[in-house]
Image (tube, coloured by chain):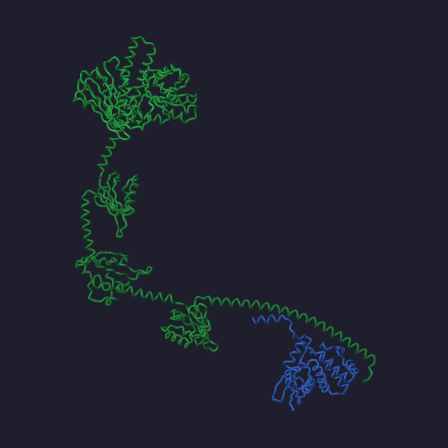
Chain colours: A green, B blue
Amino acid sequence: MAELNEDVWKRRWEREREARKSAEAILETKSTELHEANEKLRRLNEELEQEVQTRTAALQETEARYQQLVESALDVLYRADQMGRFTYVNPIGIEKFEYSEQEILGMSFIELLHPDSKSEVLSFYAKVFEQKQERSYFEFKALSKSGRVIWIGQNVQLIFTADGEIAELVAVARDRTARKLTEEKLDTTQLRLSSLISNLHSGILVEDENRYTVLVNQAICDIFDLPTSPENLIGLDCSQWAEQSKHLFKQPEEFVARIDELLRNKQLVVNEQLEMNNNRYLERDYIPIFSGNSYLGHLWRYNDITEVYETQELIRRSEEKYRGIIENMELGLLEVDIDEVILKAYGYFCSMVGYEPEELIGKKATEILLPVDYYELMANNQQKRLKGESGSYEMPLIKKDGSLIWVLVSAAPVYNHLGEVSGSIGIHYNITNRKQLETDLALAKNLAEEAQIAEKEFLANMSHEIRTPLNAIIGMASLLYDTRPTPEQLEYIDILKVSANFLLSLISDLLDMAKIEAGRIEIQARAFDLAGSLRTLQRTFQLKMEGRPIQVEASLDINVPSTVVGDEVLLHQILMNLLGNADKFTEKGKIGIRVKPMHQTNTHITLEFQVFDTGIGIAEDKLDLIFQKFKQVNDRQRQKHKGTGLGLAIVKELVRLQGGEIRATSTPKQGTVFTFTITYGLTSGVSVAVKPAPVLGNLSDNASLAGRRILVVEDSLMNQKYISTVLNKWQVVFEIAQDGQEAVSKAHQALYDLILMDLQMPIMDGYEATIAIRSTQNPNQQTPIVALTASAMLDQKEKALKSGMDDFLTKPFTPPQLEDKIKEILHFPL
Amino acid sequence: MRYQFYENLNTFPHTNKITLYQKIYPVMKGIVFTEFLEMVEQKFGYKMVDDLLISSELPSKGVYTAVGTYSHKEMFSLVTQLSERSGIDASLLLDTFGSHIFEHFTSRYNHFFSSCTSAFEFLSSIEEHIHVEVQKLYPDAELPEFIISRPGDDVLSMIYKSERKLSFLALGLIKSTLAYYGETAEITMKDLSGDGHTVEFILTKV
């Protein structure tokens, strides 16, 4: 090999260098490209992965959705191959047929067929396969694993291969069992109904809208005397039916006309009655048949009701008979239901209230006939009816013309066939006349009572009006004794006093009698000293008899207890009266009281009192008169003995009031004995503190009342003067109020020890003033108040105490009576 | 979906894209030039190489690198020059160059050869196997096309189609292949197009 010169080396080296650089540049570019390509590839890969993930997820979701749809379908969904073997069955299918998934896959659907359905199902699907019918529907019976019958209605779709062969089938099968059962039930029901109809006792004929027979039973043939069987009548034209059968009826033309009318109206009509020529009765219903608004025909029902009709007729006649009887008895009958709606109004009732029956029926009895005030009474009675109770009561009814009649109602519940109260029947008897009489009587009684009240008020007023001045007279007369009168004046004063006392006793008698008759005598049962009482009487009369040849005796049987429980005041009054009477008619000899026991128990003792005298006596035939009011035994000897004639009558009443009896025995010119009995209670050995009786005219030491403050409330100037004089004499500090109003105002200004309160005053009376003082804040709210009144009426006393007064002093009173009362109230030692 | 998939692929630079220049002026891989000059240097010495490069008026000025690409006209110029200067027929030069470059292929890409058990098997796999792999490696490489058929058990027909008319290079490679697998065969060349574009090689095992 030849040696290379320097130039060649240089060029070679140069070429090598250039080649290297060129290679480096190419490699650099390649490397960059490679890197970029790599990057792009990586990104593409990532994007692809992402894309793949997204698409996979979407695909899965879609698949899951379809899967869920199929799985949750209510119908059975399945796929089967061309041989009918299941390749897929959804869960509902598995559940319905009760096979497990493993069991059912691979099974042929033929295995699920019910033996009844097998041949028809096979021939149906053989045809479908043969004709390659893409879609088909068939219903058949299938069996579940446990042998349960399932009615299946299935849609089958055939799936073909590309070359048009059957690849598989997809089916949607619906469970039709429930519907099939319903259909079967309907068939059964229909069968039952038609057999029911043919066996009915009632004749049934159903026609269609063109009047052709649809249904008819044997009973129709019997009733209409048709010599054929019901089957032969089906499908026949009925338009001539009425015409052909009219001869059977009593009123043939009406029969035909009515049927035409019913057919025209097409309205339900039931229970029409028809009378037949053979004396039988039929009941007919016409029932049009509509489905929605379209008329489909109608049903006739004929029922032989001859027996029922005859029975009803019997009942109706019987009812008429009894109704006739009741109607003729002038009793108005009315039937209402439980809501008081009138069901039936009988003739007589209608004539009582003036309405026609039609005007009443259907109305509410209460609303049309009863005054509002009586609604409650009616409601109460209605409640009783509902409980099944009868009752009778009186009430007024409003007649049609607005006037009232009074009726006595006797009402009783009416029961329905279930035994429940369905209403009531009322029998009304007109008692308007009797009611009028009652009203008149009540009016008369009211008038009489009012008159009586007026009389009593008159008496009370009179007692006030008379006793007030009399009180002044007696009081003044007593005062006159203190004025050092001359003997002549003293005599006048005596006469004045005696006359005034006599007048007072007359008035007292009258008032006592009035009180007794008004039943206002109050019997106060208290323990009292009977012996002491008798002694006091004896002494009083002894004092009175001084200077006269008359002895006063009082004798008490040793067995009579000295203390008994009873009314001392009444006994005192009786004995005073009788002794006074004895005194009047006795010139000489003796008068007296004898007491002895008659009968005794552990708690009570009956005493016999005798008041005797040795006077002129009473003729036997006059003895009955003496206890009568205003009767006096008139003879010459008695003429000087004036009186009211009330004394013995009062005594008799007072004895009677205490449960006793009085009688008189007498021998003329020898004397009279009054005998009476009174039963007293026995004390349990405790003796009572006996209050000594005040002694007339014996004025006690007045100094003790000096300086006491008394408010006198009195409208009468005379009485003011009388009381002022007495109080001044006792050095009592007092003020006078003219009436109740002034009294209240004075009571507010100063404190008093006592208030003497007249009751009857102008402006404000004593009761009202007392109530005012007691119930308002004032110094005298607790101050004792003593009523002063001429009226001795018990109710006034009670009224006074109730109004807040502490005690009661009856006018007229003597100065000692006033003093005692004041001291008693102010708790002075007596 | 599949359509979109292709669309996406289209946005990616095509690895097999051929530049406009290459379309108009067919190119040749640099390895062919460097191996050729290597062979010239071995057979004739670098002086010959230098002469060829200077006298051939090459656009590349004779600076070749294995990783570059150059106009195949330069190869013709070089072969023509060498034939003139050495007095050796160009077809023989190419045949010899075929044997030379085969050496390079066997040492460099031995796995292609070891995966085949015979020369026919190997030759049959060139078009569908080796060229595919080469194209992946060198997207700008322009490869001849072979149509293979087996008229008989011992006969292989290879129709060579190439713009570059280097059928003798192919002949050298075929011979070397037979030698590599230790086989002998009778090779007949038929110029089907008359200008060397399409040449059929028929190998008949002896």
Residue toward you, A96 or A56: A96
The vertical placement of A213 against B58, above or below, is: above
Q: Is residue A742 visible?
A: no
The vertical placement of A552 against A523, above or below, is: above
Quarter occupied by residue A473: top left
Quarter occupied by residue A752: top left
Quarter occupied by residue A368: top left
Q: In which quadrant is the C terminus of chain A drawn?
A: top left
Furthest-left residue in this view: A621
The vertical placement of A393 against B195, above or below, is: above
Residue toward you, A433 or A591: A591
Give percent across and percent down for residue A3. Answer: 83, 83
Q: Is residue A323 visible?
A: yes
Give percent across and percent down for residue A320. Answer: 19, 49
Q: Is residue A490 left or right of residue A14?
A: left
Q: Is residue A12 left or right of residue A272?
A: right
In this figure, what is the number of numbered marks?
A: 0
Furthest-bottom residue in this view: B206
Residue toward you, A801 or A198: A801
Residue toward you, A582 or A5: A582
Q: In which quadrant is the N terminus of chain A drawn?
A: bottom right
The vertical placement of A212 against A115, above or below, is: above
Give percent across and percent down for residue A379. Answer: 30, 43
Q: Is residue A67 left or right of residue A374?
A: right
Give percent across and percent down for residue A422. Answer: 27, 49
